[in-house]
Amino acid sequence: MAAVKNILKHVSTEVAGRRRKCYRRKSHEILKGDLCLVVRDGPQSQTTYCTVCASEILTKADGVLADLRVQFAATHDPGSQE
Ligand SMILES: [Zn+2]
């Protein structure tokens, strides 16, 4: 059986090796040594977010995933669970 696909490969965390700016709000600084969220939008494009924005982004992603689950749950006949 094939391995379960990871659909979130383009999202990861990284410890900033130098001072960076948060992509969402330029006033948010990511200091060297801070954990930041890295989103790869394409082979040459990646955006980095501070912990505050990362939290909001992950909360939104949680909502999207929950919504997807709800849609699949709705297609299940409640009486036919095994
Ligand atoms: Zn930010």
Image: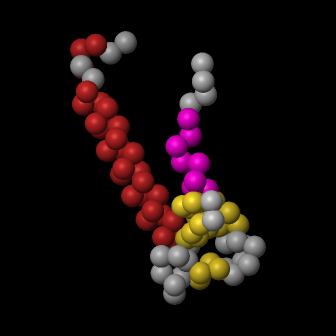
Q: Image point 58% across, 70% down: which residue?
A: 48
In the orientation shown, which residue stands out farthest toward the bottom? 27
Rendering coords of residue 25 (x, y %) = 48, 81
Front residue (pair 47, 82): 47
Rendering coords of residue 1 (x, y %) = 60, 18
Q: Main secondary structure of the magenta part?
A: loop
Is residue 8 shown above or below 46? above
Q: Count all numbered tags in the image, as a single digit.
A: 0
Q: Quadrant of the C terminus?
A: top left
Is residue 60 shown above or below 47? above
**Which residues are the magenta region?**
5-12
Q: Image point 51% across, 87% down: which residue?
A: 27
Q: Does residue 10 belong to the magenta stretch?
A: yes
Q: Image point 53% across, 76% down: which residue?
A: 23
Rendering coords of residue 29 (x, y %) = 59, 82
Q: Is residue 65 left or right of residue 9?
A: left
Q: Tell me the colour scheme of the image.
A: secondary structure
Res 68 → quadrant: top left
Rendering coords of residue 69 (x, y %) = 35, 37
In the orientation shown, which residue stands out farthest toward the right? 17
Q: Image point 30% across, 30% down: which residue?
A: 73
